Amino acid sequence: VTPVVNRTTTITKGTVYWAAPKSVIVTLENNENKQYEVPPGFMFDVEGKKLSVLEIRTGMKVTGTKIVEEPVTVITHDVVVTGTAPK
């Protein structure tokens, strides 16, 4: 058994349409509005500064990076065959 971690990084860029303490609506680069739940302690990147959801304002250009780590178990099985082939 070999423990492996699948790590997925998602970077989202957009403009703040609306922000509240636990969620934010961002207008994405394709002009689609999308709402995100904001976990405690999450920081947005705004012009090189790290800001919490309480500090961002409508119209700010933000980048959010989400990293999800998912443990995966890989089970390996080796088979050894001995003998001679028929002639």
Image: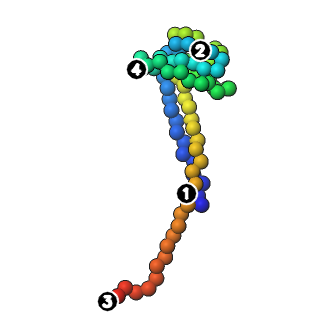
Q: Mark 4 points at which residue?
A: 30
Is residue 37 or residue 13 the one in the foreground? 37
Crowd class of label 2 (few under 14; some 14 to 19; many from 20; radius 10 Å)? some
Crowd class of label 4 (few under 14; some 14 to 19; many from 20; radius 10 Å)? few
Q: Is mark 4 on a helix, strand or loop?
A: loop
Q: Can residue 14 be seen in this view?
A: no
Residue 21 sits in quarter: top right
Crowd class of label 1 (few under 14; some 14 to 19; many from 20; radius 10 Å)? few
Kindly report the distance in space between the C-alpha atoms of the residues bearing marks 3 and 4.
67 Å
Point out the image quarter for the C terminus.
Answer: bottom left
Is residue 83 or residue 22 the one in the foreground? 22
In the depicted structure, whether residue 71 falls above or below residue 53: below
Amino acid type at mark 2: Ala
**Do callouts 3 and 4 mark residues in contact (Cβ within 8 Å)?**
no
Q: Mark 3 points at which residue?
A: 87
Q: Mark 2 points at which residue?
A: 19
**Do callouts 4 and 1 mark residues in contact (Cβ within 8 Å)?**
no
- In percent of the image, x 63 and y 18: which residue is there? 53
Looking at marks 3 and 1 on the same chain, the residue that comes earlier in the sequence is marked by: 1
Q: Mark 1 points at which residue?
A: 74
